[in-house]
Image (cartoon, rainbow, N blue to C red):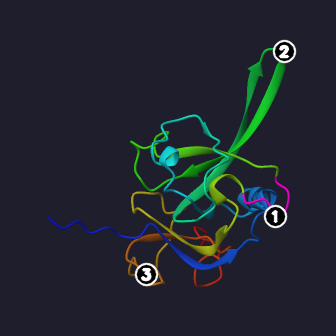
């Protein structure tokens, strides 16, 4: 059988962040949204990752796989009389929910200083989506989604849509507002 899938979103443009600077990834994540990064996904420990904070400093910097950084956090670890705080990225992988932590990985963050590529080269080529539309299902309320008079997205996709560019629909109104 053939399965047809429809896009969930469209992207109008994208931007490349300066490389090897994890602090800039955090700023982009906070103020723009998820950050796509290329990493070394061929590392045996990465492939077998099942949970915890991935912190393999010897992982190659060669990029051969992409993940999407969707968040960040930190955990405290108690070692005898000392408390260590480990900062990490939360990244979505494309290998499905049986890999890692339900399809996600927590990767240790570096110092955040310039010229530091991070674990497995995570900071070597970050990029972000800039503007676009999130296509949503018709069962959402009409105050969340809008379409043209025929029920079609003005961009040509059938169904409902949300404009993420801040300009709203084709008439300049905010999405969901009449």
Residue at the outermost left position:
1
| 116 part of magenta stretch | yes
The foreground one among 77 and 130 is 77
Q: Residue at x 41, y 70 (%)?
A: 7
Q: Which residue is mark 1?
A: 115
Displayed quadrant of residue 19: bottom right
Expressed as whole percent of the image width and height from the top left, the position of residue 69 reads 62, 55
Q: Earlier in the sequence, mark 2 or mark 1?
A: 2
The foreground one among 8 and 24 is 24
Q: Secondary structure at mark 3?
A: loop
Q: Answer yes or no: do the residues labelled 2 and 1 have beta carbons within 8 Å?
A: no
Q: Secondary structure at mark 2?
A: loop
Q: Which residue is mark 3?
A: 149
Q: Earlier in the sequence, mark 3 or mark 2?
A: 2
Displayed quadrant of residue 61: bottom right
Residue at the outermost top position:
80
Displayed quadrant of residue 37: bottom right
Left or right: 114 as drawn, with respect to 55: right
Q: Residue at x 71, y 64 (%)?
A: 32
Q: Answer yes or no: do the residues labelled 3 and 1 have beta carbons within 8 Å?
A: no
Q: From which residue to which does the magenta span run?
A: 112-117
| 147 part of magenta stretch | no
Left or right: 78 as drawn, with respect to 163: right
Q: Which residue is mark 2?
A: 81
Identify whether 92 is placed above or below 143. above
The CA span between labels 2 and 1 is 33 Å
User: Crowding near pointer 3: few (<14 within 10 Å), some, many (20+)?
Assistant: few
Q: Residue at x 68, y 47 (%)?
A: 57
């Amino acid at each position: 059988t053939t399965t047809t899938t429809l896009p969930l979103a469209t992207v109008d443009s994208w931007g490349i962040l300066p490389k090897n600077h994890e602090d800039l990834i955090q700023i982009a994540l906070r103020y723009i949204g998820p950050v796509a990064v290329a990493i070394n996904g061929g590392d045996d420990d990465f492939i077998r990752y099942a949970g915890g904070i991935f912190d393999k400093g010897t992982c190659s910097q060669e990029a051969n796989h992409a993940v999407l950084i969707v968040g960040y956090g930190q955990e405290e670890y108690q070692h005898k009389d000392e408390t260590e705080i480990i900062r990490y990225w939360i990244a979505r992988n494309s290998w499905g929910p049986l890999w890692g932590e339900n399809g996600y990985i927590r990767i240790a963050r570096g110092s955040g200083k310039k010229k530091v590529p991070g674990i497995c080269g995570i900071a070597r080529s970050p990029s972000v989506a800039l503007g676009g539309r999130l296509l949503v299902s018709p069962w959402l309320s009409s105050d969340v989604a809008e379409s043209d008079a025929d029920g079609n997205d003005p961009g040509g996709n059938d169904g409902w849509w949300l404009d993420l560019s801040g300009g709203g629909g084709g008439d300049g109104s905010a999405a969901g507002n009449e």
